[in-house]
Every structure is written in structure tokens, then in C-alpha cells.
Amino acid sequence: MHDVMHGVLGLYNYWIVIILMMTGFYTVIARPNLVKKIIGLFIFQTSVFILFISMAKIEGGTAPIISEGARIYSNPLPHVLILTAIVVSLATTALALALVIRIREAYGTINEDDIHVQDEEA
Amino acid sequence: MLSAHLPALQVVVPLVSAPVCLLLRNPRHAWAFALAVSWVTLAVAINLAVQVHASGTASYALGAWAVPWGIEYRVDMASVLMILIITTIGAIVMPYSWRSIGHEIDKKHLQLFYTCYLLFLTGLLGIVVTGDAFNLFVFLEISSLSSYVLISLGSGRRALTAALQYLVMGTIGATFILIGIGLLYMMTGTLNMADLSQRLPVNADSRTIRVAFAFVTVGVSIKLALFPLHLWLPNAYTYAPSVVSAFIAATATKTGIYILLRFFFTVFGISFSFEAMHVGEILMLLASAAILITSLVAVFQDNVKRMLAYSSIGHIGYIILGIGLATTAGVTAGMVHLFNHAIIKGSLFLAMGCIFLRLGSVELSDMHGIARQMPWTMAAFVTGGLSLIGIPLTAGFISKWYLVNAVLNVGYWPLAVLILVSSLLGLIYIWRVVETAYFQMPGYKIRKLSEAPAALLVPTWLLIGTNLYFGVNAGLVTGIAGQGAAVLIGQGVP
């Protein structure tokens, strides 16, 4: 029982990562609406940020700024890595939305199924 | 003095040039500038190759931060082969681009195109040069983001959907790689690849490392379009502008294969990847399926660019097959074909670009008798096609020779039969184009066409010439590939 509790509650941030990741992934695959797809993609990427941030936590560690009395610090490197990854994901989302705007201008719809139908007819 | 900084210059030159290119208002200046930059990167690459050949792996501490903490740029013979592929194709495609892309997109946007092109070049070269796993992810995203833009510039609205489809799949792939790298960092506390390879064997038997391996493998497989994760590729190649198809087909998936090689052999190590995880069997199975199925699919395509795209997936299969063998001969064969396929597919797509410039289409049904009006273009296509099939005296033959030998070395003769069968299928799909272009009566529209301009023909034939040269004189490529494979497998000098 104790093990189960530890697995569910002690690692709750990893469970959140998995739930977010699967939610995002499912949205990307299942939704025909391109904007929703991109939202899904963004959630998917966000889950990975939480994964990285979680691994930076060190029990009893404080913020990684040298100060009197502090012995243990959190690992700052994953934070830095994820700042870069956030920028990347921001650029991806911006580019994807720009493409969706152009698709909407060209096809008059942002529904993937309708786009397929139009492509087949052409 | 300068020679010590070559690994950094390889990446920094195109990176810094990209924003400068954006500031050039005149499209012709932007093109001339991008052209100069791509030739400089080629010169840097050749110097770097000579240096690495003479004095072994070059290591460069970026910003003079000591290596395991700072980012390391590390160039060994495997990287050298990739650098040479990327910069050679870039240097040949650039002179071609002015007439071709100038015809396909608005002149006002040309400097944006060249900026994206330089960023794409930066990303690819960065992936190949870096020795840091997270840095590799960043460069991968630089190259991917710019390639999505380049593809979306194609004429016709289907380029937009193709780019978005690639963006979605590519981002999932890159995120998978990021998860894998994160898990590796969690277990080892380092991102430096050489460091990782030292520390991984200690805790290789943990579930986390195995999961990391799976994430990286699947992620990279999406980026390199390994069957059945190739769905983004046919549309992206078909609807992209001609220059972009040629450049991406020759370099982007090849860089993906390089990432796979790096992770399998350098980071995880050959015994973990191929003995503990049995990835070799999986790769060979998928590669065989890719070779057979996509060659069959290619036979039934009416759009020649789409046909070439499917054939690309098949040829990626050949490369992966060699790597899956995990023998020195196999990896050498894979790397030889990495180079040869880049120049073959590059030249074929360039030939199609010539046709698109004059005809405005690459559908077979529009190309009846086109060889009478465009003899040089079609001759280039046929020569490239023969090389794709693997006729002796062409580069393609050398690849297949090495691959069949590597396969027979380990006694997998059914795979050799498979390679033969798919070569015959290749003969069929190339023949369909030849038959239409040479033996059909040209229609009214075709008779008005003239041969493509020299600005397009010269780069195309330059690449065809390279192709023929390495078909007869393969020593340079097989030498570098052999040394690269030896470094990866761990038998060469470190």
C-alpha cells in the first residue's frame, strides 16, 4: 500500500507529465481542426518542459544562488535547457499558426478533412 | 591561427550571415551574398576535412569553456563525410537557385528565402559538428523550422499543407529526441556525447536508459523518414520549390541518419544498441519493407517529383539496412550510399527543376516527347536515373556493390536478392519517364519549349559529373566512409 501511495503521490509531477503528454498527443492525432492540432502539439511540448524541470529538483535544495548557510542547491542546468526549448516551441507554434492562416486563405477552411476533400477534387 | 577555429567557423559563418542577408534589400545582392557564404562554408569544410584527415578528430571548446561543462564541437571522419555532403550540395545548388526560385516565388521575398536557406545550412552543419546532445537538438530545430518555411514557399496551396504536416510530425519527432536526451541527462548528469558514452555503460541496465533509447530512436526515425514514419516526406518533396526539393532531399534526411549513427554508435555504444536492444533486427526489417514497398509505390506515380520522393524513402532503406548490419562493412556501405544518394537525388531533382521552369509541371502526362526540346536536361535525368538504379560506372553501382558485399559477408543472401529486385523496380520507374520523354510524340505545348538556361544546366551537370566521377574513382568517398565507420564502430583512431 505504501509503495502504491509513493508511486502515485510521490511522483505526482511525472504523472502530470504523462497525462499532459498523452492529452496533447491525442489531440494532435484525433482533431481535424488545425488550430486544435497545434494547441495539442503545444501541450505535448509543455509536458516535456515539466519533465525537465522536475529532474532539476533536489531534495532540500534552494534556488541556485550562492548564499550564507545554504549547502544544497537545485540543479540550474535543466532550467536553462528548458528556456531554450521554450523558445524553440514558441517559434514552432508561431510558424504553425502562420501556416494555418495561409491555409485558411488558400482553402477557406481549417478543417483537415475538408482540405483533403478539396485536394482530392483538384 | 584560423585553422584552430575551423569547427566553430563551419557553423558561425552561415549563422551570422543569415541576419545580414535579411538586411540586404536587393534580391540580387542577397543571392550573391548567400552564394559567397555557401562557397566559403565549402572551403571551410574542405580545410576541416584535410585537417581531420591529417591529425585526427578535432575538438573545439566553444567560448573556451572547458569541455564537459561547456559545449564541445567535435569533428571526426564520420562528421567530415556529412560536412562535405552538405556543403558540396549547398555550393552547387546556390548558383542554380537564382533563375529557378526567382521564377517560382515573388522577387520581393527572395532575401527571406536566402535567409531561411542560410539558417537551414547552419542547422544541418551544427548537427554534424556538435558534440553536445542538447546542442544537437537546438540545431535540429533550427534546420527543421527553416525547412518548414522553405517547403511552404512552393507554388500552389498544397505546399502549405505539406509544410504543416511536416511541421507536426517533425515537432513530435524532435520532442521525442528531447525526452530521450532529458532521460539520459537524468541518469548521467552530462550532455556531452563523449562523456555520455563513458558513463552510460555503468547504468545501461536501467529502464530509464532503455526508454531514452526508444524515444531517441523513434524520434530520429521520424526525422529521417524511416518507413513507416515517412508520411510527411512525399508531399514535402513534391510541393516544395525545385531548389528546395533538391537541397532537402540531398541533405536533410541524411543528417537524420547521421544523428541515428551518432546515438547508436557513439552515445549508447554498439553493444547496448545492437546486442541489448536488438535494434539491428528491427532496422533491417523496416529497411527491407521500405526498399520493397516504396519502390513498388514509386512505379505507380504520375508526378515525377513524387516518384523520386518515394524512391528516396527506399534508398534511405538501403542506408539503414547497411547500418542495421552493425558490421564495419555494413556501416561503410551505408555511409558510401549516404554520399552517393545525396548527389544522385540532388541531380535528379535539379533536372526536374529545369523541366518545371520551362513546362510549369512535372506530371508525366504533360511530358510527352519533352526530350526533343530539352535534350540536355533529359540526358542529365537519364544519367542520374542510371546511377539510381545502380548501373556500373555510376556512383550508384559503387553503393550497391558495397551493400551487397556487406550483406553477403554475414550470409543474409535473401537481402541481396531484395536489393536486386528493388533495383529492377527502379529500372521500371526510371524507364517510365524515359519512355514518355523520348518515345512519345510531343504535343503542341511541348514543341514551343526551349532548353533550360545554362544557369540551371551547368549546376545540374556538375552534380551529374560528380556522380560519374565517383562511379569510376570511388576511392575518396569509400576511404572517408570507411574511416568514418571505423571511428563509429570503435576500431579506428579516436
Image (spheres, rainbow, N blue to C red):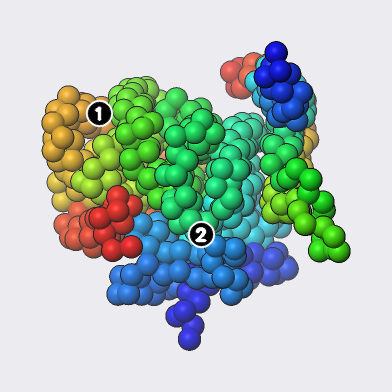
Question: How far across and how far down the image is residue B237, in percent?
Answer: 50, 38
State the image coordinates of residue B41 (x, y, percent, origin top left).
48, 69
Amino acid at pointer 1: Ser
Direction right: furthest residue: A68
Query: Mark 2 or mark 1, which is nearer the start of the sequence?
Result: 2
Residue B150 position, x and y percent, is 60, 47
Q: Is residue B374 above or below residue B16?
A: above
| Quadrant (top left, top right, bottom left, bottom right) of the C terminus of chain B | bottom left
What kind of element bears circle 1?
helix
Residue B409 appears at what percent x and percent y? 13, 38
Query: Between B269 and B280, which is closer to the camera in this rendering?
Result: B269
Q: Which residue is mark 2?
A: B130
Would residue B127 appear left or right of B396 to someone viewing this image? right
The residue that appears at 42% across and 44% down in the rendered structure is: B201
Viewer can see residue B380: no
Picture quadrant where residue B268 is located: top left
The numbered mark 2 sits on a residue in which chain? B
Q: Residue at x 16, y 57 (%)?
A: B472
Query: Disc 1 or disc 2, which is closer to the eye?
Result: 2
How busy is the neighbourhood of tag 1: few (under 14 within 10 Å), some, or many (20 plus)?
A: many
Q: Quadrant of residue A102?
A: top right
Q: Mark 2: which amino acid? A: Thr
Q: Tell me: residue B61, above or below residue A48.
A: below
Left or right, B254 with reference to A10: left
Give the chain letter at badge 1: B
Give the camera-side residue of B285 and B252.
B285
Is there CB contact under 8 Å for labels 1 and 2?
A: no
Please give the name of the residue rendered at 34% of the width and 43% of the height, measured from the top-left corner. B270
Residue that carries the numbered disc 1 in the rendered image: B422
Residue A84 tag number: none
